[in-house]
Amino acid sequence: MFDGPDYRKSLDEDVFDEWLEAGRSSKLNSEFMLVVWDDQDQNYYPEYVRDRAAIETSGLEYYGQTNDIRSVVAIYHLYSESRVSFG
């Protein structure tokens, strides 16, 4: 996932699937998973949020549209596994 010149590193699909399952299994009742790129660590990690309002208030901007160290590469609904947009 996230292959190509627009991304600094690809993400293994098995890791992505593990993140989805971890989010669904969590007792935090999250609905969305943000795939976040960390420039300092040069790696992706998941961030789980309960609802769309939490996405808006996360303080994270989209990858390629910010100079912040951390940025959102994609957002997925944990249960339908569909990619969603915000903003």
Image (spheres, rainbow, N blue to C red):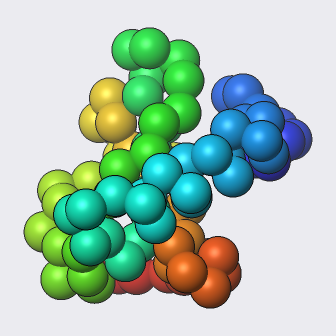
Residue situated in front as seen by the camera: 53 or 78 = 78
Image point 54% across, 24% down: which residue? 43
> Which quadrant of the view contains residue 53?
bottom left
The reply to whether residue 61 is in sight is no
Is 14 on the left-hand or right-hand side of 16?
A: right
Task: Tell me the residue at 64%/76% (across/down).
Answer: 81
- Is 68 located above or below residue 2 in the figure? above
Task: Estimate the x, y position of residue 14 in percent, counting from the top left.
Answer: 77, 41
- In percent of width and height, residue 49 lies at 27, 66
Q: Which sits in the foreground, 80 or 9?
A: 80
- Looking at the picture, does residue 45 appear above or below residue 29? above
The residue lying at 41 percent from left, 72 percent from top is 32
Q: What x and y, as percent, mark residue 55?
A: 26, 71
Q: Nearer the viewer, residue 8 or 28?
A: 28
| Residue lying at the far right of the rendered structure | 4
Give coordinates of residue 63: x percent, y percent: 49, 49
Query: Exactly how many numbered labels are in the figure?
Result: 0
- From the viewer's side, name the closer residue of 46 and 5: 46
Q: Looking at the picture, does residue 54 appear above or below residue 5?
A: below
User: Left or right of 35: which side holds 58?
Assistant: left
Say which quadrant the C terminus sits in: bottom left
Residue 53 vertical position relative to residue 22 in the rendered view, above or below: below
- Seen from this angle, which residue lies furthest top? 41
